[in-house]
Image: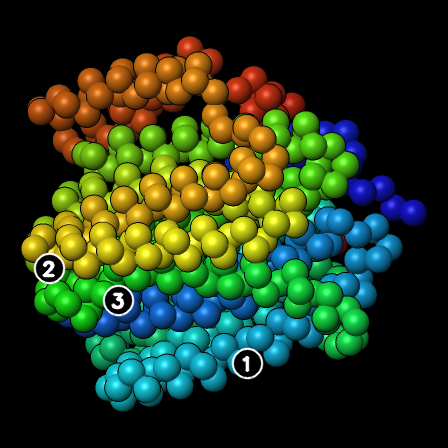
Amino acid sequence: MSEDVLTAKGAGGKVIRGSALRVAANLAGLLLGLATAALLLRHLGVEDSGRYVTVLSLVGIAVSVVDNGLNVTASSELARREVAARRPLLANLFGQRLVAAASALVMLIAFALLAGYPRELVSGTALAGAGVLLVAIANSLLVPLTVQLRNGGLALVELLRQVAALVGIAALVVLGAGLTPFFAVQVAVGLVVLGLVPALVGRAGLVRPRFDREAQRTLLRTALPVAAALALGQVYFRLVIVLMSLISSAEQTGYFGASLRAMEALIVIPVLVANVALPLLAAAARDDLPRFRYAVAGLGEGAVLGGVLVALVTFRAAEPVIALLGGSEFGPAADVLRIQVLALLFIALYQVWTVGLVALNRQRELILANSLGLLALAAFAAALVPPFGAEGGAVASVLGDAVLACLIYWRLHRSTGRVTVRAGFLVRVAIAAAAALVPLLLPGLPDLLAAGLAAVVFLGVGLAVGAVPQEARDALRPDGPLPWRWGIEPP
């Protein structure tokens, strides 16, 4: 029988390196995404860009069920199976994904019609929904790469998605297209990702969809709670802009949408890290609970480091970034982004704790936590958006994410005991952050230079005082052959 890489020596290092590789690919993708957003926002203007982000936010809710929710279930279930038993399970997962994708697309279009959207937004919903669900179908065939810790191929897919989106939107801008054709770019991106699948998984990795009754019943029992919880989470993340479209002006919705567009690119990073770690956490939860607790606590510390770093950089970088994205007419969105980016710390933490609950097979706990968090967020938004507009929406987002993080940790703590970050670690991070404030508060420096210096100081002081764990330093040391050390093995 083939060796399971999840239980082999060095699996933890592969997770760290795989996370680093996918984060690096997404940082490159972030730059491409910023270029894409700049073209889009400048071409469409404040009000049409708000409509564009609103439609993609609604589509994102469906994607959270069909792609993120089922991927979490798939990688967790595959990690628990013996190597030889994974292929039949993958075929049933593929069949489940096809049915779910088709159903989600029909429901998206029905919602747009029932909500009374104008024709261009209904057709935009259909086009964007079709595109992102094509990506979801492709991702179902790429799930084994996650379980095999071959994250290099997944990083390549994520990067090429951004390249395809940039090329498509740039072409439409040159052609002077209206709003609707921009949604069709998602279809082109989906076709590009589907075309990459055979090259990454090989002929042996391609499966036909299966619909074994017992297997599908078992998968639904595990998938539905995760899908429901993540759907609530996606509603949660996008609720504020939907509420703003109802209770605030189109201008304030556009400002919030520009900030949300920048945030969405950043939020992908903690989601990816958590998903990379899920197979290892599932195996540890099955075989070694102390190892599971150690891994969750370590990932939580990484989330704090990343969240604080991004918040510090955004303090000075927000204004030039928003100016780059949308020009002077989006200027007020910079203050919105400075506030909203604080939510990233809580989002990164609850992503880690969410996959911890999934690894423990306690998905239903997430439904309770996300439902309570959703109520809290709606209350914050209803109270803060009418008087304060987009900035009130940003504050509501931060408060809502803080509440949700506390709720998910509460359920995880009840299941497995203390897995939070160490007090000594937080002191080291605070020291590094205090040092980084020096370049941030220097008034004579250009904003981007000050932000870059703050990042260097934060990471340098963090290394010096031991905020970066030795295990992470060892895993990232380039002392092995590339590219195989980094997970880009041939299929």
Q: Give the residue number, with chain letter if any, for mark 3.
A: 242
* Residue 159: image location, x then y, percent: 48, 53
Q: Quadrant of the C terminus?
A: bottom right
- Identity of the residue drawn at 85% across and 42% down: 3
Rendered view: 43 above or below 431: below
Residue at the farthest top position: 465
Where residue 327 sits in the image (x, y, percent)? 13, 55
Tell me where residue 77 sits by quadrant. Answer: bottom right
Residue at x 43% of width, y 44% of height: 407
Whether residue 470 is visible, yes or no, is yes
Which residue does the numbered mark 2 point to in the structure image? 386
Specify whether 357 is left or right of 442: right
Element at badge 1?
Answer: helix
Rendered view: 410 above or below 147 = above
- Badge 1 vs badge 3, beta-carbon distance below 8 Å: no
N-terminal of the pair, mark 3 or mark 2, is 3
How many residues crowd mark 1 within 10 Å: few (<14), some (14–19), many (20+)?
some
Residue 219 shown left or right of residue 294 in the figure:
right
Query: Identity of the amino acid at label 1?
Result: Ala
Q: Nearer the viewer, residue 426 or 324?
A: 426
Instruction: Please name the residue shown 40% across and 84% down the image.
Output: 109
Q: Quadrant of residue 431?
A: top left
Q: Amino acid at mark 3?
A: Val
| N-term mark: 1 or 3 | 1
Counting the numbered discs, the total is: 3
Side (left or right) of 159 relative to 359: left
CA separation in Å, label 2 and label 1: 38 Å
- Distance of label 1 from label 3 (alpha carbons): 24 Å
Percent across and percent down for residue 150 are: 67, 46
